[in-house]
Image: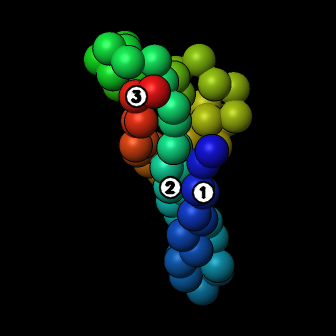
Amino acid sequence: MADVEGIIENVDGVALITTIRVHYRCKIPKGKRAEAERALGVHDKGCPASQSVQRGINVEYSADFEEV
């Protein structure tokens, strides 16, 4: 699951999306927290959508991991 929030600001009289905040809620196997946190830290480098919008929009990621 993910919650996504777009921040719209007035930039030189134009309403623009300046930031996108993505917060994931992930269930992961017990003992895999370090791997999940590492994946969160690098996933945007391999995501075409993230790479595309980062050219003009700040993208922030966070996550809550529930070990099951």
In depth, the one of 25 and 38 nearer the eye is 25
Label 3 crowding class (10 Å Cα cut-off): few <14, some 14-19, many 20+? Answer: few
What residue occupies the far front of the structure in this picture?
68
The residue under the point 52% across, 35% down is 26
Residue at position x 64%, y 79% in the image: 15
Q: Is residue 57 visible?
A: no
Quarter where residue 31 is shown? top left
Q: Amino acid at mark 3?
A: Glu
Residue type indicated by callout 1 = Val
The answer to which of 34 and 38 lies nearer the viewer is: 34
| Residue at mark 3 | 67
Secondary structure under tag 3 reads strand
Indicate the secondary structure of the residue bearing disc 2: strand
Q: Are marks 1 and 2 in contact (CB under 8 Å)?
A: yes
Residue at x-position 46% and y-position 18% = 29
Does the residue at mark 3 contact the one at mark 1 (Cβ under 8 Å)?
A: no
Q: For the residues marked 3 and 1, what is the alpha-carbon distance in whole angstroms? A: 22 Å
Which residue was labeled with disc 2?
21
- In the picture shown, does residue 40 fall above or below 22? above
Q: What is the spatial separation of the Cα atoms under label 1 and label 2, in whole angstroms? A: 6 Å
Q: Distance from label 2 to label 3 (Cα)?
A: 23 Å
What x and y, as percent, mark residue 40? Answer: 43, 27
Query: Which of pointers 2 and 3 indicates the residue nearer the eye?
Result: 3
Question: Foreground residue, 51 or 68?
Answer: 68
User: In which quarter of the view is residue 8 placed?
Assistant: bottom right
